Image: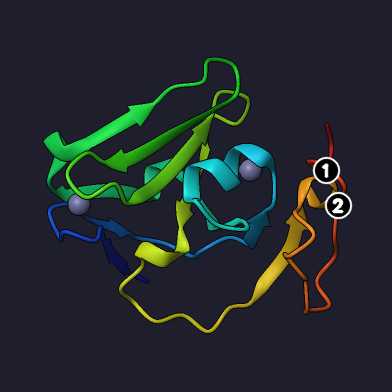
Amino acid sequence: MQEYLGSCLCSGVHYKITNQLGPIVYCHCLRCQKASGSASVNSVEIQRSDFTITQGHDLVQCFENPGQVNRFFCKHCGSQLFSQREATPDSMRVRLGTLDTKIDKKVAFHIFVDSKPLWDDILDDAPQYPARPGD
Ligand SMILES: [Zn+2]
Ligand SMILES: [Zn+2]
């Protein structure tokens, strides 16, 4: 079985993913810009049942946004770890920068590109969606 390991900046939180990774998504929405302090949030979609926190459960805190996206982070170092949407209860998105296992996948698509700042240039050929596809 495939296994991917990840951790936060302070190494207090460790997690594992025990199945295939879904597509890599770059989200350029304004909330992701604020949450990450960067141009976009880069995450990979997985099944929630494939995800386990193996260390530091008590350090994981949630910034809740009811009906939208709940963002989970390490309350000691601030690393964003993953997010969950109520609309998609079976899946979740893990922040790629916290993965310790090397992967060779590339970005599958960009969402909310209508919100991206002018200084954020998308230089790959992956499909771009103005908002969330399907909404
Ligand atoms: Zn941490
Ligand atoms: Zn976003």
Residue 68 in the figure: left or right of residue 134: left
Residues packed near mark 2 inside 10 Å, few (<14), some (14 to 19) or many (20 plus): some
Q: Is mark 2 on a helix, strand or loop?
A: loop
Residue kind at label 1, given as amino acid type: Pro
Looking at the rendering, the quadrant in which ligand 2 lies is top right
Specify the color scheme: rainbow
Q: Residue 8 location in percent, x, y?
A: 25, 58
Mark 2, residue position: 129
Q: Which residue is found at the position 36% from the left and 49% from the top?
A: 81
**In the rendered view, does 11 fall on the left or right side of 20?**
left
Q: In which quarter of the image is the N terminus?
A: bottom left
Residue 97 at x, y = what percent?
42, 66
Specify whether residue 93 is in view: no
Do residues under tags 1 and 2 come within 8 Å of each other at their CB atoms?
Answer: yes
Q: Which residue is drawn at 78% across and 41% down?
A: 132
The residue labelled by disc 1 is 133
> 134 above or below 107?
above
Within the image, what quadrant is residue 32 found in? top right
| Label 1 element class | loop
* Between 123 and 91, the one nearer to me in the picture: 123
Question: In the drawing, does residue 107 fall left or right of residue 128?
Answer: left
Decide if residue 130 is in sight here: yes
What residue lies at 83% left-to-right and 43% top-to-bottom? 133
Q: How many marks?
A: 2
Q: Nearer the viewer, residue 116 or 85?
A: 116
Give the image location of residue 15, x and y in percent: 25, 55
At 58% from the left and 60% from the top, the residue drawn is: 22
| Near-viewer residue (75 or 103) | 75
